[in-house]
Amino acid sequence: VSGVYFISLKLLGSSDSGSTATSLNVQLQKSTDSGNNFSGIDIFYSQHDGSSGYPNASSTVIHSFNAGDILRTQVMSGYMYIEASDNPYSRWSGYLIG
């Protein structure tokens, strides 16, 4: 459905092996041509200072989308922790608001 959407993202960074990391840089992207090309909507970055822990990146975006637009999160640097479980560490959602 075309309209204005509220998008919320919460992502957990990790190293390439799934262990602790120091930074995560992610871009929310949109495609208007069935996923052939993507353009950036928002960039968000998290830096964790220390030798242990995981960077947490979050963002909220209000943006106009057309029916058929495709969204994705693209990791620009670092790694995003993804787990296939009932309690995922990284998630995002979108709601039509207007």
Image: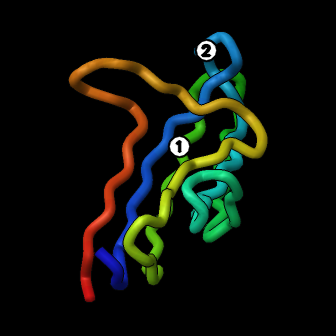
Residue that numbered label 1 is attached to = 56
Vertical order, 10 against 23 (above or below): below
Closer-to-camera residue (39/7): 39
Question: In which quadrant will I find the N terminus?
Answer: bottom left
Mark 1: amino acid: Asn
Residue furthest to the left: 86
Location of residue 66 in the rendering, given as x and y in whole percent from the top left corner: 43, 77
The local secondary structure at tag 2 comes to loop
Residue that numbered label 2 is attached to = 19
Closer-to-camera residue (83/39): 39
Location of residue 35 in the rendering, given as x and y in whole percent from the top left corner: 59, 52
The residue sitting at 49% across, 42% down in the picture is 11
How crowded pointer 1 is (Cα within 10 Å; few <14, some 14-19, many 20+) is rated as many
Mark 2: amino acid: Ser
Decide which of tag 1 and tag 2 comes sooner along the chain.
2
32 to the left or right of 94: right
Vertical order, 85 against 67 (above or below): above
The residue sitting at 76% across, 45% down in the picture is 76
Location of residue 91 in the rendering, given as x and y in whole percent from the top left corner: 38, 43
Residue furthest to the right: 77
Vertical order, 39 against 93 (above or below): below
The residue sitting at 55% across, 56% down in the picture is 34
96 to the left or right of 50: left
Q: Marks 1 and 2, Cα distance to the nearest angstrom?
A: 14 Å
Question: In which quadrant will I find the C terminus?
Answer: bottom left
Location of residue 61 in the rendering, given as x and y in whole percent from the top left corner: 47, 73
How crowded pointer 2 is (Cα within 10 Å; few <14, some 14-19, many 20+) is rated as few
